[in-house]
Amino acid sequence: MRYMATYDLMETFRNTNQWLGASALSLASYPVFAMVPNPALQWMAAWGEVTERTFQRMVTKPDWGIHSFTCEDGKDHLVNIETVVEGDFGDLIHFQVMGRDTKPRKVLLVAPMSGHYATLLRSTVISLLPDCEVYITDWHNARDIPVSAGKFDIEDYTLYLVDYMRHLGPDTHVIAVCQPAPLTLAATAYLAGEEPEAQPRSLTLIGGPIDPDATPTDVTDFGNRVTMGQLEETMIQRVGFKYKGVGRMVYPGLLQLASFMSMNGERHSKAFSDQIQRVMKGEASDHDAHNRFYDEYLAVMDMTAEFYLSTVERIFKNCEIAKNEFTIEGKHVDIGKITTVAVKTVEGANDDISAPGQCVAALDLCTGLPDEKKASHVEPGAGHYGIFAGKSWRNNIRPLVLEFIDANAGPKPGGGAKKKTPTAQKSGKSPAQKAAK
């Protein structure tokens, strides 16, 4: 109960600050106060507006905001975001451009589940839409998943990816960004051993901790410094009474956000004080640079406790992927069995989260893969965010990834006939999970 009380206390604190912001904005905005111009009232209204928006965004799932798209014919085509595979802990969604012929490149983007929603890859999706049929993993917020849905650890996560790859078919090209890179590699190896015909054509791993010890960072140092008991005691709480997942053990999004903010506290404080000044002067807008960034940055989601703890223990502490010792339901997943899937790694030279050397380690693990199907790229001057969503991605990395996809496209299924979009599938547990039981 003490964990549940702590969770509700954090939510109460957030809710109270949202209410204080709204109250300050309403009070300071009374028309009668305009008769006596007072900078203090203007500041109070600006503070209230920024504060209300800030604390409200913490529990709001961002919208994709991709409504239409200009195609090669010069016309705007509507984008329909459809769910093709449903699951308790995540969905597979497709960005269907209406009225456009199906693109030959079918791309599965594996989004991180490390505190933020899949919308963190919004700009990545937009950059790929002109040339690809884009699918992405849309992980659910653990606070909204009833306890009756069961557990969700890194083995379950991997089996979800197996199910998505199997559903999309062997003409798929997978791009994993950051946290899911090790588990996406494991999912590919799982298919290589269990169902080789369902393997994707290519696998691109971007800034992921395949071997966290290859180049230590603050993230890996933290994982090695604390014990699992300390993590469980200080980071894990039970979802409070407000949400559907009441009673579920989670690593709360608000606690993660506090950690994120504390790493660059001075910079964030200045950003918010500057925004208050801009609101006072009438220079701010609903979609200005500050709001665009923080609307996404502040929107955090809870992770299941078993996923968070098993990630730290098995990926960072025990390095099961790096040592090729990862297992699912006690069965070894041998990365060396990948023999036909082309693998490319992408790293940022200035990445302080997954430093150069951590991701490229995947190529050494693919002992059964010929050298001509391996590739790597280190982007000069790029940080972690830049290698999948920034200028480095748009100008340099994206073209290289598309070239890699084309070079490993292989023969089109069915002699080049147009392939229909996969039909929607609904399930609780992933079929791959059920098969592994």
Image: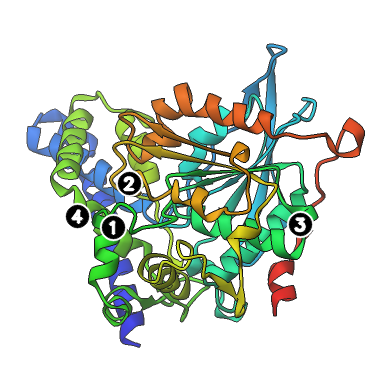
Residue bearing mark 1: 219
Query: 396 or 61, which is in the foreground?
Result: 396
| Distance from the alpha carbon under mark 3 to that under mark 1 | 35 Å
Element type at marker 2? loop
Q: Can residue 146 be spotted in the picture?
A: yes
Question: Around disc 2, counting alpha carbons within 10 Å, would you say few (fewer than 14), some (14 to 19), or many (20 or more)?
Answer: many
Residue 282 horizontal/vertical position (percent): 24, 25
Kindly check if marks 4 and 2 are in contact, taking CB atoms under 8 A apart as contact: no
Residue bearing mark 4: 262
| Distance from the alpha carbon under mark 4 to that under mark 2 | 21 Å
Q: Which badge, 3 or 1, comes first in the chain's sequence? A: 3
Which amino acid type is shown beneath numbered disc 1?
A: Val
Please give the count of numbered marks on the rendered protein: 4
Q: Can residue 19 be spotted in the picture?
A: no
Which amino acid type is shown beneath numbered disc 4?
A: Ser
Residue bearing mark 2: 355
Q: Nearer the viewer, mark 4 or mark 2?
A: 2
Question: Which residue, as the protein is rendered here, is positioned at the far top?
Answer: 74
Q: Is residue 371 left or right of residue 169?
A: left
Q: Which badge, 4 or 2, comes first in the chain's sequence? A: 4
Element type at marker 4? helix
Residue bearing mark 3: 196
Element type at marker 3? helix
Q: Quadrant of residue 287?
A: top left
Q: Which badge, 1 or 2, comes first in the chain's sequence? A: 1
Residue 229 horizontal/vertical position (percent): 30, 82
Q: Is residue 83 left or right of residue 2?
A: right
